[in-house]
Amino acid sequence: MPLSPKDIFAADRHHVWHPYAPFVNAPPVFPVQSASGVRLRLADGRELIDGMSSWWCAIHGYNHPRLNEALRVQLDSMAHVMFGGLTHGPAVQLAERLVEITPDSLACVFFSDSGSVSVDVAIKMAIQFHAAQGHPQRQKLLTIRGGYHGDTLGAMAVCDPVTGMHGLFRGVLPQHLFADRPRVRFDAPWDPADTDSLGQMLMAHQDSIAAVILEPIVQGAGGMWFYHPEYLTHVRALCDRHGVLLIADEIATGFGRTGKLFACEHAGIAPDILCLGKALTGGYMTLAATLTTRRVAEAISAEGRGAFMHGPTFMANPLACATALASIDLLLGQPWQARVQAVETGLRTGLEPCRGLPGVTDVRALGAVGVVELDQPVDMARAPGEFVRRGVWVRPFGRLVYVMPPYIINDMDLATLCAEIGGVIASGIVAAP
């Protein structure tokens, strides 16, 4: 028998620990009954326009018939099988498709079950590659401040140690290297000095650095900052000059979110290792992939040097792989660039009035990402409930009220979403007391 909304809420409070929240005195949660298109239907009957794509992954919206059918068809033959010593069609087809649509130099695919784990895999690949090349001392990662790469221990270690969420664990994490965050905005005149900090650190520590890891163009949960494509171009050249691998974390930016299929395309560069997740399955199943070049894979796998020691239990889950194939086909089979551009236009127009509101320091949009930055942290005890009261789902963090809506959102819903963001900010409720 289904639980009533009251029972769901009571049982949730008694047993369930939600992300980025305390167990005791937790912020309010809102039971969801169903989801379709860009609408979330709450258990109490209210409907919300979804501005978050379920943490950026539901790019096609919810309950899509094409993805539902792919899941049903695969379920009839095989839900799961271990990937150690076995293989199957959906995984092989998905690997081929990912190699086809990503930069030409990427040829080898390692599957895992979450974005954070795909980052851990990438870090291990980089370290093991240099060990195989006779440079076992190269175990450091160099990254840029303001970044976020996940919540597992390896990924946490390359998140910003000062402004990030993991300062409590600093003493137990590997100590890596952090260059200054890029200063030049995506659409501002380029300044070559922007890469000076990273270049200087590469020069000083090149003998101990295995790889540079960064989020291309858009820094996500570390600050929603959009930086200039020339920064990536210069970083690629610096990595080549110093014999360092380049890891691109496209977990949030992949599959069209920034207006390019992959954010690296803004700079026309290819990483040595690429991390994908989130929108890979259109938000249906948890799945991630780490792609690399044959040079890296063959060095790690050369005779006498051992296997790559990683193997998630649900690696290459057939249901997830089949859904990912359907999601990629669905995306590429439509004029997705035009749709994302329309979302960007709607976000720019709809959020611009926020620029004149008290407490707002910046408004920016790129692709299907819109951000209003405040001068004070958002009051997370009150703000989500106010958004729900206004009929939209927006989950801010830090000083940022941001949205990453499904690509299928129409102009009217997008305008409503932006207007309600402005209304909540204007009410003063978002600023923490």
Image (spheres, helix red, strand yellow):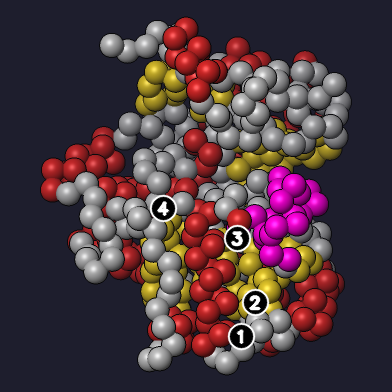
Residue farthest to the left, as pictured:
77
Asked which secondary structure carries label 3, the reply is: helix
Instruction: Give the foreground label among 4 and 2.
Output: 2
**Identity of the residue drawn at 56% across and 25% down:** 393
Q: Which residue carries the number 1 mark? A: 136
Read off the magenta span: 154-175
Tell me what residue is drawn at x 65 percent, y 55 percent: 156
* Tag 3 residue: 154
Q: Are discs 1 and 2 less than 8 Å apart at CB? A: yes
Circle 4 sits on which residue?
Answer: 113
Q: Earlier in the sequence, mark 2 or mark 3?
A: 2
| Horizontal side, residue 381 vs residue 315: left or right | right
Identify the residue shown where x is 80% and y is 40%: 362
**Numbered disc 1: secondary structure:** loop
Residue type of the residue flagged with mark 2:
Gln
Inter-mark Cα distance, 1 to 3: 18 Å
Sooner in the amino-acid sequence: mark 3 or mark 4: 4
Image height check: is 309 above or below 220? below
Placement of the N terminus among the 4 image quadrants: top left
Q: Between label 4 and label 1, give the one nearer the viewer.
A: 1
Residue 222 percent coordinates (x, y): 70, 49
Q: Alpha-carbon distance for marks 4 and 1?
A: 28 Å
The image shows residue 20 at horizontal and vertical percentages of 63, 35
Please state which amino acid type lies under the numbered disc 1.
Answer: Pro
Residue 168 falls left or right of residue 305: right
Residue 139 got which mark? 2
Label 4 secondary element: loop
Looking at the image, residue 414 lies above or below residue 160: above
Q: CA distance from mark 1 to mark 2?
A: 7 Å
Q: Which quadrant of the rendered structure holds the C terminus?
A: top right
Which numbered disc, 4 or 1, marks the residue that appears first in the sequence?
Answer: 4
